[in-house]
Amino acid sequence: MGSRRFARVLAVAVLASQVAVQVAALTPRWDVGHSLPLHLSDLAGLAAGYALWSGRRWACHLAYYWGLTLAPQAVVTPVLLAPASPHWAWLLDWTWHLLVVAAAGYLVCGLRMRPGWDGYRLTVTVTAGWAAAVLAVNRLAGTNYGYLDGKPNRPTLLDLLGPWPEYLLAEAVLLLAAWALLTWPWVRSARRAEAGSAGQPGRTLGAERRPR
């Protein structure tokens, strides 16, 4: 199976699992506080599926940064309101987030998408826009999407970052730093490759045959 075909198979798996999770969120009844796909992990899944299917660079960037920093948190400290683990809904949600992480890794290793500072800036801008929009929804509907208005009622990594609203600032700083660390090695590698290719013609010219 070629890399492009495998990417599309993985895209279908990511999107199908996300649809299943959203359907599970509608049971036993629809709830404005939990049933809307407004968490950033929801957007990460959509971006990952679209990036794998289309190869669009902007979607690849969002899937890479969101998938490798936000989805692992949901795997380590899930906050899904399931009766008990391993409940089928809990396992489904856990599997979905693992697929998002796998998608982010495959975009880099399989499809050779290389992040850069342009992708970093794009992700920061889109994330800030998401936060502003979701804060407005939370205030209007009395919800807590993105956990922007309070921590989950289950233990998460946010418990280590202080009370609200201080933990929002700490989380933003950590994300900016983590995304920068996810960008810097690729930028450095690209610069080394460019320097090597730029030096190659010089060596070729220096090796020109001298007139006899």
Image (spheres, rainbow, N blue to C red):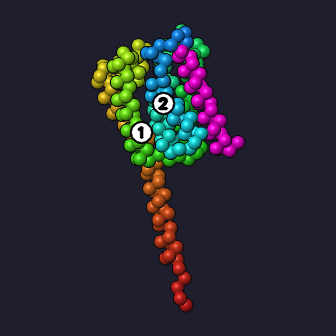
Q: Give the secondary structure at mark 2.
A: helix
The residue segment tinted magenta is 1-26
* Earlier residue among tags 1 and 2: 2
Q: Residue at x 50, y 13 (%)?
A: 30
**Residue occupied by mark 1:** 123
State the quadrant of the C terminus.
bottom right
Q: Residue at x 54, y 35 (%)?
A: 48
Which mark is drawn over residue 43? 2
Name the residue furthest right: 1
Q: Is there any visible trace of residue 4 in the rendered image? A: yes
Q: Residues within 10 Å of mark 1 (few under 14, many from 20)?
A: many
Q: Position of residue 183 (x, y in %)?
A: 43, 44
Nearer to us in this view, 146 or 198: 146
Q: Residue at x 62, y 30 (%)?
A: 13
81 in magenta: no
15 in magenta: yes
Horizontal side, residue 188 vs residue 29: left or right: left
Name the residue furthest left: 166
